[in-house]
Image (tube, grey):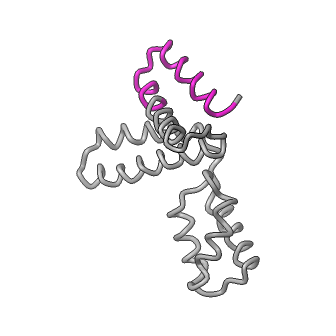
């Protein structure tokens, strides 16, 4: 079963179970996928769907920071619940230690030894971590490694 099919099935199950919140979250994710498919006139494969879902999670995490600044606990709780639902469709997330190992391997692979080589390391890491780690976290770990 493809990821889009799983989303569709879970959406139907949530409708039957009268879980309006989950229905809305999955609907937003499906709409984001559909918009990209219509814009590019292609059918997205599972890897591309994972990218779209990762962007949805990232946008909610960004909004979460603003909600916390504004002391809006209701919106923080809603965003966290949405993130939790969307994360269930993404691959298992990498731990910080796993990311550090990937960074060390990529650094030795490209021969990086200064902050100027950050772009090279990031280019080597991104295909390995797509959808499995937050890019800002990867970036900060690479900077830490290169110091």
Q: Quadrant of the N terminus?
A: top right
Count of numbered tags: 0
**Residue 145 position (above or below residue 90):** below
Is 135 in front, or is 4?
Answer: 4
Q: Quadrant of residue 5?
A: top right
Q: Image quadrant for the C terminus? A: bottom right
Magenta-colored stretch includes residue 19? yes
* Residue farthest to the top, as pictured: 16
Answer with left or right where residue 85 lies relative to residue 90.
Answer: left
Residue at 70%, 77% (x, y): give it. Answer: 107
Q: Is residue 80 left or right of residue 45?
A: left
129, 68: nearer the viewer: 129
Instruction: State which region is magenta.
Output: 2-26
Q: Residue at x 62, y 50 (%)?
A: 93
Provide residue 109's location: percent of width, then percent of height.
76, 76
User: Is residue 20 depicted above or below 90 in this figure?
Assistant: above
Residue 39: x and y in percent read: 49, 42
Q: Nearer the viewer, residue 74 or 37?
A: 37
Q: Position of residue 53 (x, y in %)?
A: 53, 43
Furthest-left residue in view? 70
What residue is rendered at 72% in x and 79% in y? 110
- Note whether 51 is above or below 99 in the view shown: above
Q: Residue furthest front?
A: 41
Which residue: 63% across, 63% down?
126
| Residue 98 within the segment the image draws in magenta | no
Name the main secondary structure of what is drawn in magenta: helix
């Amino acid at each position: 079963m493809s990821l889009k099919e799983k989303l569709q099935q879970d959406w139907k199950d949530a409708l039957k179970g009268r879980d309006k919140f989950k229905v809305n979250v999955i609907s937003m994710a499906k709409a984001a996928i559909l918009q990209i498919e219509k814009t590019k006139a292609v059918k997205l494969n599972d890897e591309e769907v994972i990218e779209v879902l990762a962007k949805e999670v990232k946008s909610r995490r960004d909004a979460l920071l603003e909600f916390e600044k504004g002391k809006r606990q209701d919106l923080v709780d809603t965003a966290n619940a949405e993130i939790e639902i969307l994360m269930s469709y993404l691959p298992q997330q990498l731990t910080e230690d796993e990311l550090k190992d990937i960074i060390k391997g990529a650094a030795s692979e490209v021969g990086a030894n200064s902050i100027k080589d950050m772009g090279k390391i990031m280019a080597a890491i991104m295909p390995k971590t797509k959808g499995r780690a937050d890019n800002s976290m990867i970036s900060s770990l690479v900077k830490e490694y290169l110091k």
